[in-house]
């Protein structure tokens, strides 16, 4: 697939990298297919994770799991087969400008971090949003259970 020239600068990474990011006992395990993020976004991503860490308690994971339990308990007959097709998840979203980070908490405890960006085109010196969004999984936020010996 050929990428339109106006979108190529947003799709093809320039200064993207996968720096080590850890806050408290949480760390980001970068997705193999991810290009990472722009270096200028690293402090913002660290700040976002730092803001989220106090809320990533077992209570939130249990609440996400309880959504499915409640649905399964209330399902009857043929509805039971469709429960797995309907998979509610807990999403925490942070938007700044045209960039949105989403923390997706799944039923099994998997916590994925996604990044999406609305593509903006500069035409005759004016910025115009397009209908094109670029989105990818950055990685998984994991809890490090190993003691830190420094």
Image: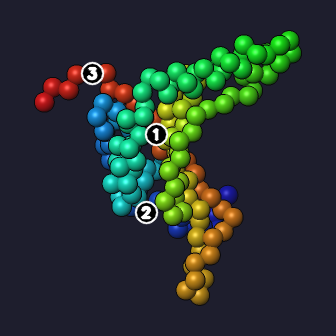
> Which numbered disc, 3 or 2, marks the residue closer to the eye?
3
Question: Which type of secondary structure does the marked residue at label 2 adopt?
Answer: loop
Residue at image point 30% right, 30% down: 25
Nearer the observer, 79 or 17: 79
> Tag 3: Cα neighbours inside 10 Å, few (<14), some, or many (≥20)?
few
Which residue has dot 2 on it?
Answer: 14
| Left or right, residue 29 beside residue 107 | left
Q: Earlier in the sequence, mark 1 or mark 3?
A: 1
**Does residue 138 lie above or below 141 as drawn?**
below
Extreme-left residue of the structure: 150
Q: From what the image shows, is residue 69 above or below residue 44? A: above
From where the camera sits, is residue 28 visible?
yes
**In the picture provided, is 50 more to the left or to the right than 63?**
left
Residue 139: give its label: 1
Camera-side mark, 2 or 1: 1
Dot 3 corresponds to which residue? 146
Question: Marks 2 and 1, Cα distance to the nearest angstrom?
Answer: 19 Å
């Amino acid at each position: 697939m050929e990428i339109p020239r106006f979108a190529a600068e947003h799709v093809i990474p320039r200064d993207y990298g996968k720096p080590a990011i850890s806050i408290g006992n949480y760390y980001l395990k970068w997705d193999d297919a991810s290009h990472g993020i722009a270096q200028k976004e690293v402090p913002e991503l660290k700040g976002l994770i730092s803001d989220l860490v106090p809320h990533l308690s077992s209570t939130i994971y249990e609440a996400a799991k309880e959504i499915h339990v409640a649905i399964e308990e209330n399902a009857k007959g043929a509805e039971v087969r469709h429960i797995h097709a309907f998979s509610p998840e807990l999403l925490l979203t942070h938007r700044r400008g045209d960039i949105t980070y989403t923390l997706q908490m799944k039923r099994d405890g998997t916590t994925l971090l996604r990044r999406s960006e609305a593509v903006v085109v500069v035409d005759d010196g004016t910025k115009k949003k397009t209908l094109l969004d670029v989105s990818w999984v950055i990685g998984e936020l994991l809890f490090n259970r190993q003691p830190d010996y420094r």
